[in-house]
Image: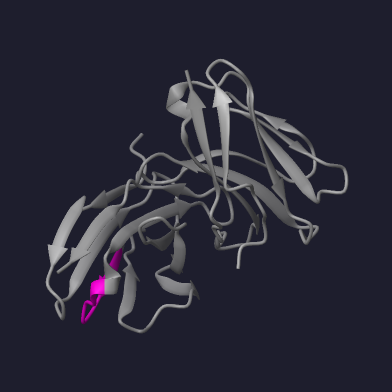
Amino acid sequence: DAKTTQPPSMDCAEGRAANLPCNHSTISGNEYVYWYRQIHSQGPQYIIHGLKNNETNEMASLIITEDRKSSTLILPHATLRDTAVYYCIVSAGREYGNKLVFGAGTILRVKS
Amino acid sequence: DAGVTQSPTHLIKTRGQQVTLRCSPKSGHDTVSWYQQALGQGPQFIFQYYEEEERQRGNFPDRFSGHQFPNYSSELNVNALLLGDSALYLCASSLGGQTMFFGQGTRLTVV
C-alpha cells in the first residue's frame, strides 16, 4: 500500500501557483519524498525529490515540514500543460534501486 | 542523450498468447524496473533487475518474467495472456538507488 495520502483532485487558475499537499506520517528517517506527474497515459515524469530540506529546481519547489510528516509541491506559475495526475511517493534509496509504490495521486486541473 | 525507450508502443494480442516487451535504459543507468498500469489506476510494481538478476518482485504471478542483458537493457515476458493483462506497461531505469526515470510505455491490449 502507498504510504502517502493526497487529495483526489484540485483546481488551479492558469498563471497562479499550484500547491499540492501530501501527508506521509509514517515516513522513515532514510526515506525520501519523490514527486512525479503523469500526463494522459504517458509515462510518469520525475519532478523533484527531497529528504529533509526544501528543494527547488526548474520545474517546482518542494517544501517538507520539520517533522517530515507532510510536504507540499509548488508549481509557481501553473500553465494548462501542467494539467496531470501528480503522485507523491516515499521511498528509500537502496544499493540496487528504489521500489516506488504509487497511490491514486492528485488530479490537478489548470483552468484558463 | 536518449531517455528510457520502450518498444513497441502499442500491441494487440489474443488470450493465451505470449508477449515480449523491450526496454532500453537511460544512458549510464544500471537498474531497470517494470510497472503495470491499468486504466484509471496508478502504476503497480512488477519487478526490478540489477546486474542481470531479479532483485525485487511485486505481487504478480509467475506468468510475468523478465530478463536483463549485459548492456542493461531488459525484456518483460508475459505468458498465457488474460484479458486482465490489458494495461500500459512502463519501464523505468535508475543508477542504483538514485532517481528513477520512466519510458513512455507499451500499451498492451488483450482480446
Residue A63 pos. (x, y %): 75, 35
Specify whether residue B73 is in view. Answer: no
Q: Is residue A80 left or right of residue B87?
A: right
Task: Check residue B11 for magenta coloring.
Answer: no
As drawn, which residue projects farthest toward the top? A15
Position of A74 relative to A72 (above/below): above
Specify whether residue A14 is in view. Answer: yes
Residue B73 pos. (x, y %): 32, 58
Q: Which residue: 57% across, 23% down?
A: A58
Query: Image quadrant for the N terminus of chain A?
Result: bottom right
Q: Which residues are magenta?
A: B75-83
Task: Check residue B81 for magenta coloring.
Answer: yes
Residue B88 pos. (x, y %): 31, 57
Q: Is residue B5 left or right of residue A73?
A: left
Position of B4 relative to A98 (above/below): above
Q: Is residue A7 left or right of residue A38?
A: right
Query: Which residue is nearer to you in this view: B28 or A37?
Result: A37
Position of B47 relative to A40 (above/below): below
Q: Which residue: 20% across, 62% down?
A: B109
Q: Which residue: 48% across, 23% down?
A: A111
As drawn, which residue projects farthest toward the bottom? B62
